[in-house]
Image (spheres, coloured by chain):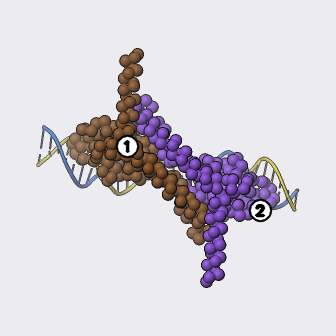
Chain colours: A purple, B brown, C blue, D yellow
Amino acid sequence: MKRNSRLSSTLHILVHMAEKPEHALTSEQLATFIHTNPVVVRRTIAGLRDAGIVTSSRGHGGGWLLGRAPENISLAEISTALGETLLPFSTAPESPGCLVEQAVIAVLDDFRVAAEKLLAEKLSRITLADLTADFRRRYDLIGVSSHAV
Amino acid sequence: MKRNSRLSSTLHILVHMAEKPEHALTSEQLATFIHTNPVVVRRTIAGLRDAGIVTSSRGHGGGWLLGRAPENISLAEISTALGETLLPFSTAPESPGCLVEQAVIAVLDDFRVAAEKLLAEKLSRITLADLTADFRRRYDLIGVSSHAV
DNA sequence: TTTCATGTAACTTATTTAGTTACGATTTCA
DNA sequence: TGAAATCGTAACTAAATAAGTTACATGAAA
């Protein structure tokens, strides 16, 4: 798993889980999908469990399942549950008391608040179901082209 | 200079330059403003020079000046000149040929393109002049409160 | 009670970014 | 013309962050 790909890797995993709603997938299996190892998977999606997006069970036959229907899981929730920040820049003060810095931070923070709201809104309109639908479309297309050949 | 603070640090520097339009500031001076060293400053704002946002001159009395009026320098330009990415997540393929990944990347890239456009628009409406105005307001306020006491 | 699975802490490794040193090129000034 | 000041940039070091790995405790099922 590459850097900064936690969101896309997690979505990859979730689509697989959505495609096997009745079958718990182990961390081991999920790890192979995103070319990493089971511990990284467990660590990465631990927050999703806390958010009720997935459930996990131990022991024989255990593993991971979606916590609810893909229609009710938005990318906004997933991103939040992963602890991802939508904007990459920092506005933490480095020279408390400096008026220039205070002005910079004030303006940037205003922008940040507004931007995060916008992004969260956009992400909340995309659901896991949209992703699985997109996947199925691609899958069916391959089938068609195979027949055509 | 902390991590992920290249944008705010650069804005800090630029406000100082806007406040001294006639006086070239050296990398050394700029470095002290953001608590780093001259080479980091030169490296960081090299892109701004290429974009015409600032100019630099060598030798005795040399240093850095704004390339044009603060009203005509937007945060969008600055961010771009710094080579900053507005969104932090990666959508680089890790398993070429995987249809699930393709679906995930397609959806995320659509979001990314739309989101970057939105953010760039918002940033293009904020200029360096807005920052200096904010700074002056704070500066004047301090003066007033000093008189009051 | 054995096996399979997660939960998690601790450690190692890889990557990225900032910091540093060094020095050449350019400009000003005495 | 020579000394001092300043940027430009390459090369290296250090620090921070994130991923990968190992190890083992916990819990569930056969």
- Quarter of the figure with residue B61: top left
Q: Using residue A95 as the reference point, say whether residue A34 is left or right of it.
A: right
Q: Amino acid at mark 2?
A: His
**Residue B132, percent across and down?**
36, 36
Could you tell me how many numbered marks the image carries?
Answer: 2
**Residue D25, percent across and down?**
77, 47
Find out whether the residues at labels 2 and 1 contact each other: C-beta distance under 8 Å: no
The crowding category of the residue bearing disc 1, from other C-alpha atoms within 10 Å (few below 14, some 14 to 19, many at least 20), is some
Q: Chain of mark 2?
A: A
Q: Residue at x 61, y 78 (%)?
A: A145
- Quarter of the figure with residue A71: bottom right
**Towards the viewer: B43 or A8:** A8
The crowding category of the residue bearing disc 2, from other C-alpha atoms within 10 Å (few below 14, some 14 to 19, many at least 20), is some
Q: Using residue A90 as the reference point, say whether residue B33 is left or right of it.
A: left
Asked if badges 2 and 1 are on one and the same chain, I answer: no
Residue lying furthest bottom in this view?
Answer: A149
Q: Quadrant of the N terminus of chain A?
A: bottom right
Q: Residue at x 48, y 51 (%)?
A: B118
> Disc 2 or disc 1, which is closer to the eye?
1
- The residue under label 2 is A23
Q: Using residue A23 as the reference point, say whether residue C18 is left or right of it.
A: left
Q: Secondary structure at mark 2?
A: loop
Q: Residue at x 36, y 41 (%)?
A: B128
- The residue under label 1 is B127
- Quarter of the figure with residue A136: bottom right
Label 2 to label 1: alpha-carbon separation: 54 Å
